[in-house]
Image (cartoon, rainbow, N blue to C red):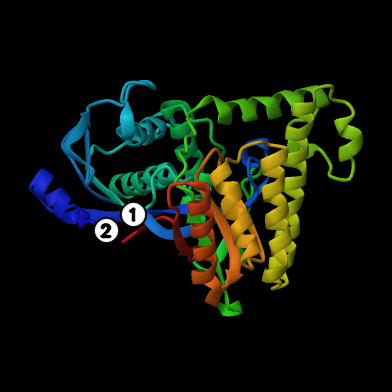
């Protein structure tokens, strides 16, 4: 990763007051359940955004290793005032001010090795690193449990991406060697042991290199459909639909597409609960079929996969993965596969060969290690 302190010195002519980092994430299971008040199980990646920052006399300036000239703003203003990638930084300033906090003026330099556009929450990592830095620089009294909602508000209201609370929660609250079991309604968390290496296992993540966008009509359409289904069913959110009563519940909906959307969310919530139960018992290999069932549900009922991720999942399973699924909001991004640690090269080769046969752009694989959330370095 680029030396972010050196970028800061070159840009601002001084040493930063400190370095703050926040990771990307992959979601082990629980897709599109977060904005339905349901359950998710992400873990943080070692790949992270690092922010070098210092207090300034006025306003905010931010530069990165991808952009020579800093973006400056004296006031975050209203949503839309600052655009482009700097909107994620301005959004954090805006969200803190909206919540009544005195936001310290600051200069930032940003660098990252979180893959962009891969569905591993590079935006949440940026938000979380900047938020953590501003809290420390300003001596703000904001409990860790309350921080994800601030970062989510920045992304929802300022940037305009209708994401749930999972990404920011993972980037801020995850612990090394564990997956974060998050109840998206109460925002209660439990750190679930997920030491795959101790079991001779690994989680192989494969970036499909298919385009991935959240700020588009498809993601918003799925969320709108779920909210409308909850209204028609007379429940606060789809989390309140029982898996035991699912068939009877679906009969109350006339639209087949809406029925399939509901079925995905309700069964996905149950898969999260079943996965957590297995992990609590140390039965890591047994979560594989739940991962694979999750992918089938995303493909057939929620219709958020693309050919590249479907091919990658199938190739990983054929090469011996215990389970595999797309991770993230969909329409591109990554898959993850639970494999024996000594099979990483073989599974990677199988996916690469399948891509070559289909004429797809070569994928980018890496082994994911459950890592620490946002911190000062």
* Image: 98 above or below 350: above
Q: Position of residue 126 (x, y in %)?
A: 37, 45
On screen, residue 234 versus residue 181, left or right, reads right
Q: Which residue is mark 2?
A: 1
Q: Is residue 371 visible?
A: no
- Report the residue at 84% width, 22% height from top: 254
Pointer 1 and pointer 2: residues touching (CB < 8 Å)? yes
Front-most of residues 215 and 43 = 215
Front-most of residues 310 and 263 = 310
* Image: 313 above or below 34: below
Task: Give the image quarter of residue 55.
Answer: top left
- In the rendered structure, which disc, 1 or 2, sits on the residue that comes first in sequence? 2
- Count how many numbered circles sit on residues in the image: 2
Q: Is residue 224 visible?
A: yes
Mark 1 to mark 2 CA distance (whole Å): 6 Å
| Mark 2 secondary-structure assignment | loop
Q: Residues within 10 Å of mark 2 (few under 14, many from 20)?
A: few
Which quarter of the rendered picture does the C terminus lie within? bottom left
Q: Which residue is mark 1?
A: 113
Task: Give the image quarter of residue 373.
Answer: bottom left
Please, which residue is most extreme toward the right here?
248
Task: Give the image quarter of residue 329.
Answer: top right
Q: Position of residue 83 (x, y in %)?
A: 32, 26
Q: Residues within 10 Å of mark 1 (few under 14, many from 20)?
A: some
On screen, residue 239 versus residue 320, left or right, reads right
Which quarter of the rendered picture does the N terminus lie within? bottom left
- Report the residue at 81% width, 38% height from top: 241
Q: Position of residue 215 (x, y in %)?
A: 47, 29
- Report the residue at 87% width, 33% height from top: 249
On screen, residue 188 versus residue 4, left or right, reads right
* Image: 171 above or below 82: below
């Amino acid at each position: 990763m680029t030396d972010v302190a050196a970028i800061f010195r070159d840009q601002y002519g001084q040493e930063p007051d400190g370095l703050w980092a926040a990771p990307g994430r992959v979601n082990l299971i629980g897709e599109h359940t977060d904005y339905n008040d349901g359950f998710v199980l992400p873990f943080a990646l070692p790949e992270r955004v690092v922010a070098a920052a210092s207090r300034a006399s006025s306003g905010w300036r931010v530069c990165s290793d991808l952009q020579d000239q800093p973006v400056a703003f004296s006031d975050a203003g209203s949503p839309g005032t600052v655009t482009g990638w700097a909107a994620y930084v301005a959004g954090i300033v805006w969200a803190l001010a909206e919540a009544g906090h005195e936001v310290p003026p600051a200069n930032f330099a940003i660098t990252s090795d979180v893959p962009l556009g891969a569905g591993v929450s590079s935006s949440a990592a940026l938000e979380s690193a900047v938020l953590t830095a501003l809290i420390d620089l300003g001596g703000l009294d904001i409990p860790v449990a309350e921080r994800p909602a601030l970062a989510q508000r920045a992304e929802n209201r300022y940037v305009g991406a209708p994401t749930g609370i999972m990404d920011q929660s993972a980037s801020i609250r995850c612990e090394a060697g564990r997956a974060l079991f998050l109840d998206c309604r109460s925002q209660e968390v439990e750190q679930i042991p997920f030491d795959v290496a101790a079991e001779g296992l690994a989680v192989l993540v494969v970036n499909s290199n298919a385009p991935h966008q959240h700020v588009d009509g498809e993601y918003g359409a799925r969320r709108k459909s779920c909210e409308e289904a909850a209204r028609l069913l007379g429940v606060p959110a789809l989390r309140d639909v029982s898996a035991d009563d699912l068939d009877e519940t679906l009969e109350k909906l006339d639209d087949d597409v809406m029925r399939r959307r509901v079925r995905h969310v309700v069964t996905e919530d149950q898969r999260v609960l079943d996965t957590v139960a297995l992990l609590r018992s140390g039965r890591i290999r047994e979560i594989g079929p739940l991962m694979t069932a999750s992918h089938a549900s995303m493909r057939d009922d929620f219709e958020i996969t693309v050919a590249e991720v479907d091919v990658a999942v199938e190739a990983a399973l054929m090469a011996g993965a215990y389970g595999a699924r797309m991770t993230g909001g969909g329409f591109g991004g990554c898959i993850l596969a639970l494999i024996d640690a000594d099979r990483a090269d073989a599974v990677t080769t199988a996916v690469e060969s399948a891509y070559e046969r289909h004429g797809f752009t070569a994928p980018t694989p890496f082994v994911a290690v459950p890592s620490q959330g946002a911190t000062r370095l």
